[in-house]
Image (cartoon, coloured by chain):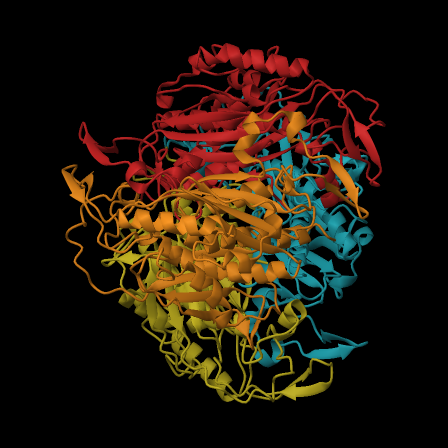
Chain colours: A red, B orange, C cyan, D yellow
């Protein structure tokens, strides 16, 4: 038990369900003196918000953050910061139909097995709704990272068979990502991805994809051997997000086919600074940042909820079908981007602060 | 700092470098009364040991474990268990040649950036040598899991372009894996893999691959929302191992190309037990075990050390070349199997014990 | 940094300041299925509340708890439980007078030294206001302990020179404690204590005391060697409360004057159960519960805030005087009882759950 | 379970029993570049060692530390440091006599209740033998603190009814403490204490006492609200030591009798620095260091083992007597001093490093 905290020096603890009063995060370890207002959360929350475009779910959530503590006169105090985001839509619905049925691909069955019952009104604690406060915490993490000149940018790399061409991941900017609703900076591929998602939606189906997240500006030296390597903590953070089925760094799974002579990045000296000629290693060596851009990818499964009848069983094991009536994302990728960025930023903010403790 | 512990209820803490006196692990949280003798470690240590076959490094290490505490009259006591494995070969060598050079693909540069110097005698703390005590801890974890009927089996899935065909991952047995030196249970593919590694070795090169690790017998309900999901903690453990560049579960990166209607596993009732018809989800839903076999894969990069000259720079940024004289694995995969199994077993033993704390 | 969490298997994380919007606690590790309603918090909150009697501060706070998550249909879900208690009285006051002065005995100076500024509107995060959510968490902990038949009862043992006579600490009941406003079950001493506090209040002064907290029903075996001994974790919890200057168990500081032959409690067999004849050890041996009542005492300093001028300095070191205008407790003891009980209950609930993880 | 680690940024994890092969500590979070040799441990180990004087146990233990990792070329590397101290005397003895009897005041019974059996050869994990590696870790902690100009000095304040007069705790030096075998810097009281312990020893009895530990040089600002206050973490560390029955800071339990107007320390400006006129608060306000010397006291119970017959029961509850044959300390205080200092130093080193993480 007790799995709702993440991080050591910068630690977030979350609570909340999809259909309860709200979601709350306590962020422990925020350095004092960082300017922070409630409006600072709105941009990333709007990127995560349902109903933001025709290719996301049409549910409406206002996502108004309230800072409950940790900020005084517009600046962080150094003590624990908490943010509450109430759920808008808790109206009583008729759940009788799905109350005893296990939705395919969801955690209904496993929560029931673990806890002896489940919150049948929705995903409960397993719902992606809980990520709303992670995105808020990510905003604080990004502000901390900004002090070190570190910037995190994520984008869609692949939707179904459509793979974006991104020759220089480290050059992609937030405005390029936000230039289209699918959040893919390959301007030729983006419209095709949007068309594909639209087609999938019309077919009452969903589709998976790959997100790529790039971090620039990390100095060499972040990450702690041997278990808290950057690659280990980042992966833990990313896999803690719903629907993530794979994580890879640099060349990733492609290394299986490479020879050492092809895969090694050679050290060079460039403007008086030691770096590597290429970045197949993805910005970490021995799990410690190398000073090169950190490049990773996450595989995201297609949304499990479908507005078509799917076979399943009841709690008692009786055969039945289930058809989700709610409005769901035909593709999770566009809304995953801010969530993935948040977890990367939270992990890196933690390691930035942890790194300080060997400076005495 | 302080990144050398892993786990909550079953927690391992390790210390040791490649060329120091030895490696030690303290295992905290071992339940009392489990039979344990020093000879119990020998099998898995021999699977990890260098020099075990013609396709691994020819270095010789005896790897004799000494139980320092936590066992009394052949049984675990419930208090902290510690195991010491001394390094055999600490003979003074001439490191002058590589002392100031950064080995490509290694953590020499990042350790130097982090700590202000590095142990130039070898990988130091970044060496895969440190995994020797993880494998020992894995033996204890496997014994704990055995009490719950849980078995972890890993094997080689891919070497370079050669991909094994494993129609039923959950049926693979340890003896099938150990039937050949590459640890691939596909009897037709194994000889080809061995031949490929042999060829690569003769070319003074190395090659990557993919390991698949399967766990059978986990009941539904292990794993803690939202950050300590099984998939999150397993990934942290696996990525904390050297050379791991990717981790995926079930369909893994393949989900990017699937539609929801193709990817969802439907719940069925089988002999009075609820399960799913297929296991594309890899044994976890919402990060909690579903009762189906847990299936994961790790991408392992080709060995960075090559016995051929590679370009690099010195600490001062001067161009030079480096040629590793030591004997190195042409392919890490056969020796990775026990390491990967160990981290999976350690993670699952932790979650098995954590699971107990909601049973009151 | 990151010091706002307490516990391992049952872990509370808190946030909030005296003059911010409110205080919040996230409780992680609550077992599922425990009945819990918002009204369950009211009794202990009322015991902690200012203005409850003539010998406490006359401030009024409503302390209405809102369960934000972790409860569904009146029962805990097993996922993280969060409780929000808003601050009533945040009205803008004129703090100009004390803004730059350090209040004697308070954390104004140390917070300023640590964070570079302080919340001058009150104690901020150092205010006893933050304990309101600890008391709420204590209610949940007491419910968990009730499942094991464990009951925590605290009472006032000493006010100034007045020491209560409690021949059988383990027999004191909550109703005896609540029978008078000073929460002292010695019916002869209680009126004298009340009179003393009243006299102190009239003299614009404050007075210290000692609280005794007794826990009955703990089976032998709770507590984890060697650092997480019960006595260690209880002391950490109690000293984390404001104003606690000493903690002792059983004979406590009196052991300094005892000989081993006087202090040892001899084991006996009583109705088929092994126990000790006496309980000078206070219910723990080797930091593990012995099955006897756990008896501890906390020394509480006199309230630092006084409504009389006290000498101090400004931030710039200029001599001045400060006179607290707020209404303050002339003695902290009556309101400390529920706080101390809460921390004991929280610590023991954690160890109850931790204890489960060696039962496999 | 899993209670064998202490600290966050500077974290020690220990293992070992009184009669096993040895004791080991892994210290995680040691900053790089600190000079450290095995001989650096010898002084404090000799202060803890049995047989050091006529008023301690006459057992002989060599306590030779071996650094297993974390030091390279005489300096710490920044990676996990481990130290092994083998037990000298593991010779097979005839334990048949005490095997099934519970020693009064010891953890035999509670370990049996917890784990289902106990290491009957001695205290096992509950023995004070395990503190040998804590003292070693304390040496490393003291070296880290020295970088911040922080010095920890402990001494005996009271033995039985004999109380030392120490007008200026912050002026006591290590050499004053070490000037006599009872480690009491009051040169008039020391001989009386020694005589008392000698008399107690001749009476085949033991006696308790109080240790005072003073830390000088801590800047204002160490300690983390609200649970990881310095006073909370120090108390946890100190109570985790065997035989500690009470801990108090500054005025300690005496605050019960004081009025606020007597107890408050007034802020003054002294040579341009803000401090307090008096130090009744013991160096911490709100659990954060105030810049004044940190002053604390521990109550230590009389040794439980007595070389005289004491009544007890067997595992089956049968009445019997037990007489400890081993050589035991008639008074634990002289040997407690280095243990107490070590835990204070370890706690403060942790908070020193944690403090760094808010400096960005």
- Disc tally is 0
Nearest the eye: D41 or A347: A347
Identify the image quadrant of residue A114: top right
Q: Is residue D156 visible in this depiction of the protein?
A: no
In this view, the residue in front, D358 or C261, is D358
In this view, A129 is above or below C131: above
Query: In the drawing, does residue A57 fall left or right of residue B29?
Result: right
Residue furthest to the front: B188
Is residue D279 in view from this perspective? Answer: yes
Q: Is residue A120 left or right of residue C317?
A: right
Question: Is C283 situated left or right of A300 in this image?
Answer: right
Q: Is residue C339 above or below residue D80?
A: above
Answer with the quarter of the image where residue A92 lies.
top right
What residue sits 35% from the left and 19% below the top? A171
Quadrant in the picture for the C terminus of chain A: top left
The answer to which of B103 and C87 lies nearer the viewer is: B103
Question: Which sits in the foreground, B53 or A2?
Answer: B53
| Position of residue D117 measured from the top left corner of the image (x, y, whole percent) | 64, 74
| Residue visible at 37% across and 81% down in the picture | D53
The answer to whether residue D101 is above or below residue C44 is: below
x and y percent of residue B124 in the render?
30, 53
Residue D343 % position (x, y): 44, 59
**Among the 4 quarters of the image, the one containing residue A57:** top right
Measuring from the top left, give residue B341's x and y in whole percent.
51, 53
């Amino acid at each position: 038990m007790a799995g709702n905290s993440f991080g050591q020096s910068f630690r977030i603890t979350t609570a909340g369900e999809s259909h309860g009063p709200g979601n709350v995060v306590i962020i422990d370890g925020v350095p004092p003196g960082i300017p922070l207002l409630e409006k600072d959360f709105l941009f990333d929350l709007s990127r995560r918000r349902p109903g933001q475009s025709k290719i996301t779910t049409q549910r409406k959530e206002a996502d108004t953050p309230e800072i409950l503590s940790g900020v005084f006169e517009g600046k962080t105090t150094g003590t624990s910061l908490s943010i509450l985001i109430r759920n808008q839509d808790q109206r009583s619905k008729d759940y009788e139909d799905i109350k005893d049925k296990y939705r395919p691909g969801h955690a209904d069955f496993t929560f029931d097995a673990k806890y002896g019952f489940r919150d049948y009104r929705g995903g409960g604690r397993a719902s992606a709704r809980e990520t709303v406060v992670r995105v808020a915490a990510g905003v604080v993490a990004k502000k901390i990272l900004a002090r070190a000149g570190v910037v995190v940018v994520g984008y869609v790399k692949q939707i179904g068979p459509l793979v974006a061409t991104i020759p220089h991941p480290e050059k992609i900017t937030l405005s390029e990502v936000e230039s289209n609703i699918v959040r893919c900076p390959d301007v030729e591929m983006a419209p095709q991805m949007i068309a594909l998602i639209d087609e999938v939606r019309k077919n009452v189906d969903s589709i998976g994809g790959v997100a790529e997240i790039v971090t620039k500006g990390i100095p060499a030296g972040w990450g702690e051997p041997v278990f808290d390597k950057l690659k280990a903590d980042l992966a833990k953070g990313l896999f803690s997000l719903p629907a993530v089925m794979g994580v890879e760094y640099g060349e990733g799974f492609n290394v299986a086919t490479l020879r050492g002579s092809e895969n090694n990045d050679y050290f060079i000296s460039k403007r008086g600074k030691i770096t590597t000629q290429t970045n197949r290693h993805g910005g970490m060596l021995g799990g410690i940042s190398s000073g090169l851009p950190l490049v990773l990818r996450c595989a995201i499964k297609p949304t499990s909820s479908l507005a078509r009848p799917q076979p399943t069983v009841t709690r008692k094991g009786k055969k039945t079908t289930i058809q989700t009536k709610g409005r769901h994302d035909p593709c999770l990728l566009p809304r995953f981007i801010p969530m993935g960025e948040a977890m990367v930023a939270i992990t890196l903010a933690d390691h930035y602060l942890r790194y300080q403790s060997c400076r005495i």
